[in-house]
């Protein structure tokens, strides 16, 4: 059975849907290959770098999970976390309007509606894609919510 025509059609279809025009994704990856990443707000443990608050590579910014480590309800925690994300994005030369992807981790899925009340509108008129999950065993540091994101500069 000859699958070459079908593969060719699939490749063309995927390239057009993704807007890649052939192998430009590979070219873009090679273009970024020589660039050094920038790390911001590095946390150390016993004088060894543990993780960064954010890193930047090319025109992308990756912000580490931010939590709220104080007494309060999920709305207060969500508000704090979103302000922390925004501060980290600004340090890296980006903004909330340039966020492409957000991950939300809830200690309790019953807090979903309340978290959304605070979350809505924080990323402008074109919100990012988002994944929201409830964590098994809670969020580190007893936060009721943690969020991380990916943005562009």
Image: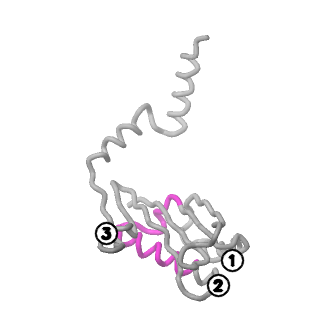
- Please tell me whether residue 143 is drawn above or below residue 135 in the rendered image: below
Residue 41: in sight, yes or no?
no
In the structure shown, which secondary structural element does the residue marked by tag 1 occupy? helix
**Closer to viewer: mark 1 or mark 2:** 2
Q: Is residue 30 left or right of residue 140?
A: left
Q: How is the image coloured?
A: one colour
User: In the image, is residue 93 part of the stretch drawn in magenta?
Assistant: yes
Q: Which residue is the extreme one toward the top? A: 1
Residue shown at 41% from the left, 59% from the top: 152
Residue 147 in the image, given as x and y percentages of width and height: 54, 69
Q: Looking at the magenta stretch, what is its main secondary structure?
A: helix
Residue shown at 32% from the left, 47% from the top: 32
Q: Residues within 10 Å of mark 1 (few under 14, many from 20)?
A: some
In the structure shown, which secondary structural element does the residue marked by tag 2 occupy? loop
Residue shown at 59% from the left, 66% from the top: 104
- Please tell me whether residue 105 is drawn above or below residue 72 in the rendered image: above
User: Mark 1 vs mark 3: which is more N-terminal?
Assistant: 3
Q: Is residue 19 left or right of residue 41?
A: right
Q: Quadrant of residue 133?
A: bottom right
Q: Which residue does the numbered mark 3 point to in the structure image?
A: 48
Which residues fall within the magenta stretch? 78-101
- Please tell me whether residue 142 is drawn above or below residue 128 in the rendered image: below
Q: Which residue does the numbered mark 1 point to in the structure image?
A: 114
Q: Which residue does the numbered mark 2 point to in the structure image?
A: 73
Contact flag, marks 1 and 2 (Cβ < 8 Å): yes
Residue shown at 52% from the left, 28% from the top: 11
How far, Cα to Cα, is label 1 from label 3? 38 Å
Residue 13: in sight, yes or no?
yes
User: Mark 3 vs mark 2: which is more N-terminal?
Assistant: 3
């Amino acid at each position: 059975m000859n699958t070459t025509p079908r593969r060719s059609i699939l490749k063309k279809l995927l390239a057009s849907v993704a807007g890649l025009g052939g192998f430009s994704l590979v070219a873009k990856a090679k273009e970024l290959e020589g660039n050094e990443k920038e790390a911001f707000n590095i946390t150390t443990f016993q004088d060894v770098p543990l993780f960064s608050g954010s890193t930047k590579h090319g025109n992308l910014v990756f912000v580490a999970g931010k939590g709220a480590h104080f007494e309060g309800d999920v709305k207060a925690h969500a508000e704090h976390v979103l302000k922390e994300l925004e501060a980290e994005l600004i340090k890296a030369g980006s903004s909330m309007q340039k966020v492409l992807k957000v991950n939300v981790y809830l200690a309790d899925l019953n807090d979903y509606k309340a978290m959304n009340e605070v979350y809505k509108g924080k990323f402008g008129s074109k919100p990012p894609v988002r994944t929201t999950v409830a964590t098994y065993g809670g969020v580190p540091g007893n936060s009721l919510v943690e969020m991380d994101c990916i943005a562009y500069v």
